[in-house]
Image: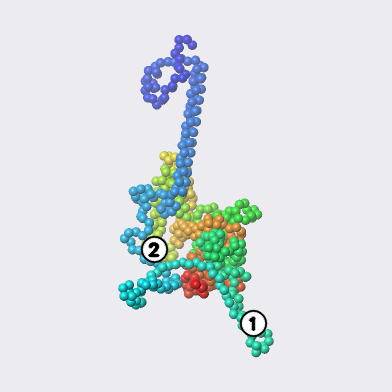
Amino acid sequence: MEGTTRLDPSAERPHPCLGTAGGKGSRFAREWVTISKQEHIDLRARANYWEAQHARAKAQVEALTQEVARKEATIKDLRQRLFGKKSEKHGPLPSEKERGDGDDAPQRKRGQQPGCAGHGRTPRPTLPVVAEQHAPADGQSACPHCGLPYRRTPALDEQSTVIEEQVRAYTRRITRCAYTRDPGCCCENTPAVISAPPPARLIARSPFGVSFWVEMLLGKYRYGQPSNRLLQDLADQGLPVSPGTLAGGLQRLTGLFEPVLEALYCKQMSETLFNNDETRWEVFVDLEGKVGTRWYLWLTRSASVVFYCIDPSRSAAVPGAHFAGLQGERAIIVCDRYSAYKKLARLAENILLAFCWAHVRRDFLEAGRALPALEPWALDFKARIGMLYHLNQQRLAHWDPDRPLAQQGAAFEHAQAALQAALADLHAEAERLLAQDDTDATLPKVARARCKRVLTSLLHHWSGLTVFVAHPEVPMDNNRAEETIRTPVIGRKNYYGSGSLWSAQLAATLFSILQTLALWGINPRAWLTAYLNACAEAGGQAPSVLAEFLPWSMDAARRAELCRPAAPPTGIDSS
């Protein structure tokens, strides 16, 4: 079209946010531009194209921003796992008061504090004493001038104490005295030669005595040492033992502990409060229908018994089978939020679950550690949970276990009301945050999702988290179980698990027995020595009467005897 002013298609369109320069009051608003229809179509098409490109780029930038935030959170979490402190008590998210001058400044120096009275040297009255006399060297006990000797004055002797540890393998050479019949004896049906009976053996025709197997069992199942290290230690003492000999002997001993394990189970099923946990345990056998070597070691701890069982499954059928023998009308299980326990509680009406506040606290700590935007929020809930622990301790200080909850004293009722108020405040805060639109619109989307997930889990498990309020005997967390299961976890890390079904069962059995003994304060070495000697006296079988070996049925004198260290062997030639 001639005589018309055309708009340059390449010219930049005025931005609507430029003010009067591109608004109705500018001089460009009073000028008309005439273009062809085709050019108008092309410009509209180009505008739509670049608007679509802009929207697509904006969405990609938003997605990349979230991905960067997610990866930064992952990096921070992994860095914290690698370099951070592992203790939850002194975690990586201290409050401002705890931080001091720096983020990593400790609250106090480790060890004894200046100005505090120490406990002094630890007395060890049960250690045997080997007396030694050290005299001056030759020529030093006489006067160097006149040569007259010094006189020994015992009243001026000085005492020095040095504690030594000697581990020594030795051979017991037993002489069985033989007696022949007198020539004048003509009695019938009498042997011509008599001798002392052979020594009792734990395993028939085995050259190894009770003390050998006590050391092997303690080394592997109490101290977490692999078999090859135990054998290397024996070889360094001059006692080489083949791995097959050790494995065969342990297999023969498995049946001796089955009656004790059955007694532990029966005792535990008569109780009402339990702490449960589970951990993986490798069993390197091929089992039909089982894929892989990952089995599970299940722990149930009560007031009197620590009981382990090993199973290829992690389903609810395992704790269901264990608690099928409950003798009481009601049982409370303190556990984490694993679904197997929830299913168990749904199927068994006499089981009540009490969930662990330490796991809830860990949720907030991990969220704040992984996402910096959630750190103030996580610290706030960490402080609230810490206050719950404090109020519960104050409540328990006034609790009388022999009186019902409704008949406690005024101090307990006051502490109970303060605890309930703190719980109600925490619950209301969680509900308030969840009721907000996406929790907090100022937070990144990944942080809002993490925050919502943690709060939803808290409210979903609220009934189990508050069981301890109506039952003061119930702990707020499952730390008892997690502390108890550490010994098997150390053993698993050192010797990777079990190579056969019988060795896996022996591990669960010995873990149960040794940790139950520790629960009662009984010396495991003394108990194992006494029990295996009784088995040897019974001809390599379990003793028929177990009362003197069960902590809850033995008398006080017997318990005190087994609480002391095992007596050292006698008759060793020290030359």
Q: Residue at x 52, y 60 (%)?
A: 224
**Circle 1 SS class:** strand
Instruction: Give the image location of residue 349, x and y in percent.
Output: 55, 59
Which amino acid lies under the numbered mark 1 shown in the image of this protein? Answer: Val
Q: Residues within 10 Å of mark 2 (few under 14, many from 20)?
A: some
Which amino acid lies under the numbered mark 2 shown in the image of this protein? Answer: His
The colour scheme of the drawn protein is rainbow
Instruction: Give the image location of residue 188, x and y in percent.
Output: 68, 87
Query: Is 108 above or below relative to 258?
Result: above
Residue tagged by mark 2? 398
Please say if the residues under marks 2 and 1 sit with CB atoms less than 8 Å apart.
no
User: What is the number of the mark on residue 41?
Assistant: none
**Residue 435 can be seen in this image:** no
- Looking at the image, tell me whether mark 2 or mark 1 is earlier in sequence order: 1
Q: Residue at x 67, y 88 (%)?
A: 187
| Number of the front mark, 2 or 1 | 1
**Circle 2 SS class:** loop
**Residue 393 can be seen in this image:** yes
Left or right: 181 as drawn, with respect to 132: right
Instruction: Give the image location of residue 226, x and y in percent.
Output: 54, 59
User: Which of the two residues, 365 or 32, is positioned nearer the viewer here?
Assistant: 365
Instruction: Give the image location of residue 74, x and y in percent.
Output: 47, 44
Q: Quadrant of residue 504?
A: bottom right
C-alpha separation, residue under disc 2 versus residue under disc 1: 74 Å
Residue tagged by mark 1? 193
User: Which of the two residues, 328 or 158, is positioned nearer the viewer here?
Assistant: 158
User: Which of the two residues, 56 or 505, is positioned nearer the viewer here?
Assistant: 505
Left or right: 254 as drawn, with respect to 304: right
Q: Residue at x 50, y 25 (%)?
A: 49
Badge count: 2
Q: Given the current orientation, which residue lies at the most extreme bottom position?
A: 184
